Amino acid sequence: MKEIALDVSHVSIDYKNLMHMSLHQSILKNGVQKSEIIRAVDDVSFSVEKGQILGIVGRNGSGKTTLLRSIAGIFQPDEGYIDTHGNRVSLMAIGIGFNGNNTGRENILKSGMLLGCKLDYVKEHMDEIIEFSELGDFIDRPVRTYSSGMYSKLSFSVTAILDTDIMLVDEVLSVGDEHFRQKSYKKMEELMMSERTVLIVSHATETLTHFCDKVLWINDGKLVQTGDTAEVLERYNESMQL
Amino acid sequence: MMKNKNLIIILKILIIAGFIAGGMVIALYPVGNQAVTITVDTDAETISYTLPVDEIEKAKEVVVAFSGAKDAVISEIRIYRSLKSVCVEKILPSNIDGFASVQKDSIVFNENTCDMLRRVSASFLAERIILMETVLALSMLLWILTGALNEKMNPENRNNHGPVFEIRRFCQDMSKYKEYVFFAAKADLRAEVANSYLNRLWWLLEPFFNMLVYVLVFGRVMGHSVQNYATFVYSALLMFNYFSRTINYSVKCVRNNRDIVTKVYIPKYILLISNMILSFYKLIFSMIVLIAMMFIFRVQTGWNILWVIPAYLVMFLLSFSIGMIFLHYGVYVDDLGYAVGILLQMLMFLSGEFYDVITSLPAPLNLMMMSMNPAAMFIDTMRNALLYNVAANLPLIGLWTLISILLCYIGVHIVYKNENGYVKVV
């Protein structure tokens, strides 16, 4: 039995639908209107072993991203609890805190620090990140001059190189050109070999079959099935057919 | 467990009762007339003269003797009661003729001054307001302490947002994000000027041209009775602009940083602090211009100029704490930004950027403004120290420091309690 890196038990997350409103609305309607409560994640529990790679599949709007976000600590679940056993968690997303007017280098530092790394640590890995991102001279130009592919390559590199114990990947593996895609695949394989625990949300079945040890299928916020990759994906794909 | 809960409720009721009772006593307690002191500040020395109550009643003129009165340069005459710095009337050198005539070895104050003395002697309003604010602050403090007690007594309430827990967490977060805060401020600053031709020079040019406008408009066109009027206005605006910029930013803070807030966890006030540091860097450049301006206009300064520092500290604390409260409501209420903008505009004209609150407003109003409007208080303290070498209102500034620290705690509490819901809204 391997060490458990992440425990999610009976987690439910509500969107109270408190959209922002104007002053007069809030006065007239006597405070916050408490009408619709949307349950985005409903009583989901699972646990991930250290070094395991878990895929999460489901239709659009079934609560995958919400689940990842609450694992990353961006918001707390309304019910249940998430225990990361003291591991540092990072949600791999495009351009965390990127400012278009800053150079790539500055944005790497800022992004890295937002992921909870120390400044010196990010500086040490700077060259590695730049090399991985294949940006070359562009790294010292403002990010707003980047093409969208370069932009995502840079942000992928930051999270891929900087070491966090648990990595949450939200459909970003299709980043960049074919060459970079293969490279990220290789990087992911490397990560798989290492001690990192990874959670991937993806619609690409081949990616999941390639990487994942285990797959989690969520539909309408409810857990449908967890288990062996091939098995779950097969059933999932059946349900997705027209 | 149940007993603890009851104890806490009883304590809270006691605090509310104490607050109401204290307020009533302060509002209604009859206070008799008091002795009044006249202080004359000259460039060389400070002369004080105290009149007992019965003399003030029938005084027609007051003679304050000091040698060499004729040759001395009088910078300010202050009239106050026992609580020295709270209730003050001022006579400025520019309108001294209406109140007194300067003889060879004395100053003779006339009927107008005696009226002023009687007014100062009889009024207890300012003290009442100050005491009321003190009671309010103490009640707040006790309330928070009760919360801490509640937290300590229920060990299973670990994740509850008790004061001890929150203050510890605040310190931990601050040390964790220390590097980020400074780095982000610098990066944003660089980003602002990244594609302009004159680049960093703008940080100096902007305050410089502002200053030029003030010198021309306020110094020359609107010839004014206040000495060094351009510096007077410029220094106050620097301070108030920082305050209003911080609060204006705080309303939009979470939404402006959507990219960060939806992708990683970060204590939301870190974003506000980072912006405050950014404004602080800009403030430093404006300060350089201000110092140059003081040299050009030959402003006389002394050791009392150090009071500028506590005045600024209170301003930073207050803008942070108020900013945090608005940061929370700004997430949910769309048009709070407009409301806050209007309020700040009003506050700007009420806090005396363009005039001296104490001398320009009529009698009870000036003291009320001074003791109830923190912006008027910190601007006046800063300006007195900077331009006239006058020491600060220690009780007043101490009181507002206490209030802003308490507000700070309340802000941190609100943000910690609600920040996990922000992502769902923005």
Image (tube, coloured by chain):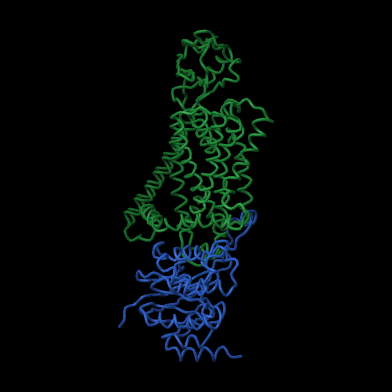
Chain colours: A blue, B green
**Is A30 on the left-hand or right-hand side of A154?**
right
B23 above or below B327?
A: above
Query: Could you say which is closer to the camera, residue B129 or residue A174?
Result: A174
Q: Quadrant of the C terminus of chain A?
A: bottom right
Q: Position of residue B30 (x, y in %)?
A: 47, 24
Q: Nearer the viewer, residue B332 or B244?
A: B244
State how many labels appear: 0
Residue occupying image coordinates x 53% and y 69%: A137
Q: At x 43% / y 81%, what residue is drawn? A: A54
Task: Give the quarter of the image for residue B210.
Answer: top right
Farthest-out residue, right: B221
Name the side, left or right, on which B286 lies relative to A163: right
Residue with the most extreme top position: B104
Look at the picture and state if A169 lies above or below A204: above
State the residue lying farthest toward the left: A1
Quadrant where the image shows the N terminus of chain A: bottom left
Instruction: Please say whether residue A75 is visible from this viewpoint.
Output: no
Judge whether residue B259 can be spotted in this image: yes
Q: Nearer the viewer, residue B273 or A14?
A: B273
Farthest residue to the front: give it. A137
Q: Point out residue A87 in the picture as x, y percentages from the top left corner.
A: 36, 70
Q: Position of residue B246 (x, y in %)?
A: 54, 49
> In this rendering, is residue A189 above or below B324?
below
Residue A194 placement, left or right of B400 = left
On the image, the x and y values in percent for residue A107 come to 51, 64
